[in-house]
Amino acid sequence: MLKRRLFEQVFEQVLVERVGTMEKGGIEVLDSQVLIRETDFSRLAHTWEELAEVMKSQGDETTPLKLMQLAAKTKNAELNIAFCGHFSAGKSTMINTLLGVNLLPSNPIPTSANVVKIRGGEKAARVFTMNSGVLTFDPDTEMEKLKQFAVDGDTVESVEVSYPGTFLDEYASLLDTPGIDSTDAAHKIATESALHLADVVIYMMDYNHVQAEENFNFTKTLKDRGKPVYLVVNMIDKHIDFELDFDSYKESVEEAFATWNIHPDGIFYTSLAEPDHSENMYEEFKGMLSQLIAEREKLVGTSVRSAAEHLIDEHIQVVRTSQADQRQQWEAQLDGLEVEGIDSRNAAAVQEALEQEEATAAALEQRAEDARVQMEKELSVLLDNARLTYFSTNEAARSYLESRKPGFKVGLLFAGKKTEEERQRREEALLVEFREKVAGNLDFHFKEWLGKQPQVFDLRNEEYHASVHATKIEITGEFLSKHIKEGAASSEYVLNYCADISSGMKLEYRRVGLSFIAQVVEMIKEKVRVESAAQGERLGALRELAALHQKLAGLAAREEETKGRLLAIMRGGE
């Protein structure tokens, strides 16, 4: 029946296209994708079956069953829209309202352990049991049985209701899942076990519980799987506008999910208790579901591929579990080998340490030399970036230089004494100005940087640190006078003089800095000498650790090889 129906649909579409082109006098062009659509789904279903066989041959009993379910769904190009959320979110009531018939109990079933599937088609309710086959009953008169079977998670595999006259057809279904906030692990398993069959997820939340952390965790998991996720904030009739206007409430919802890097495909705000509520988006929501059903084949085509990839990942987890004993044995050996400063479980750190140890014997001095080059480079950058003269410095220097020119004289009486006092005053003014700039723009940063250098190389030396901060580089009148060039009297000379005293002071700091760098280099050399003395024992332990990590990497490589093989089968079937 399915193939005949699909063929009739394709034939009808092709016929419409043909008539359209004939009426326009155009050339008939047939969409080859339409003609092979049924074949595409059939081929994909066969691929899932092939994947299931490979997984089963590797000892996986669970994932192949999910793939076979996916294959059956793929053959029918069946669209499944899963309703998830808390018990109190009103999933069952929403589904009943959408269908226009009360197929589900109007109150939540707090002990439900099964997913209930509702689709279009002939009126029937079916319960697929583990031991008694398929049981059927009338959904109009025997709905209490549905409730009984829904709570039976031990002997019932699934519950399915088909009902005519709704917006669903036999190739589109709604899945009512147990609440994700249940304390019963079986309920959560039932929900998660159905997600590989869901092409679209409707995540429903009570107005008052939107920002529960479980909502964010669950929806992020769904989005990470590549599922289209639509949020429904239900029971908005609880909103009190004078406390917070509704636009602000909606904005807070969107911001909360965005903070978790969750970007839903749509958000709908609904009220079933007050259909005329001004913010009720029920009709838009129902229209969106109808649009999804209209795009069934496109959605299913994308969804089943994504689901298959996720099931491949699940299978790899099963393979990883099967290798757990061997992995634990080797990891226990890793934990039994202790190498100071190394996390034995960190393969990259072990390998890096091994390579470093093997290179140490031939490169003891190089390590210290590299540190010296690095520190000298950083010192040069620090000095180059230090600005020591400003406009105020230039003005003080201008006044100072004038007092040092031949013929400079102040006053008539006692001119010699007054002139000398003025010279001293101007010199002191420049000293105060220049010392202030050096202290704030160079000295502080210089000592801060030098003091931290031992830590950069995992060293600690309190005496060195104290010596750095006790260092004083004096700026004297002699320093200022020795940078005066005799005979220089141009207008640019003041700027050149300021540049000279700035460079001269940086040379002093460079000289002191290099002496401290030399001390750090000696500390590094001493540390290397100590390490090399214990290198033999350390190197042996590192090599043993590296060998164990290679064995563990072999297990991971086999997992990757298995995944690659399965993905190749999957892509070959497309």
Image (spheres, helix red, strand yellow):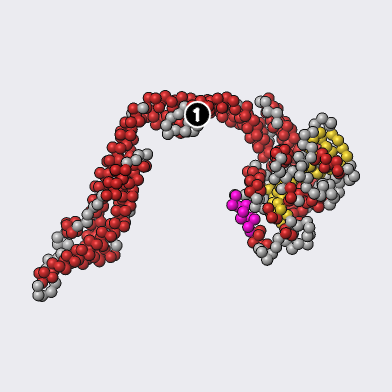
**Relative to 446, 559 lies left or right:** right
Query: Could you say which is closer to the camera, residue 312 or residue 245?
Result: 245
Mark 1, residue position: 335
Residue 392, visible in the rendered structure: yes
Does residue 364 sit above or below 180 in this rendering? above
Pick the quarter of the image with the N terminus.
top right
Report the span colored magenta. 251-260
Label 1: how many Cα within 10 Å (few below 14, some 14–19, many 20+): few
Residue 143 x %, y %: 86, 44
Residue 63 image-quadrant placement:
top right
At 64% across and 43% down in the image, what residue appears? Answer: 221
Residue 316 x %, y %: 63, 31
Majority secondary structure in the magenta region = helix
At 31% across and 31% down in the image, what residue appears? Answer: 529
Does residue 179 sit above or below 537 in this rendering? below
Residue 368, visible in the rendered structure: no
Query: Could you say which is closer to the camera, residue 290 or residue 452?
Result: 452
**Relative to 161, 511 lies left or right:** left
Going by the numbered disc 1, the residue's amino acid type is Asp
- The residue at the far bottom in this view is 412
> Which element is circle 1 on?
helix
At 76% across and 38% down in the image, what residue appears? Answer: 73
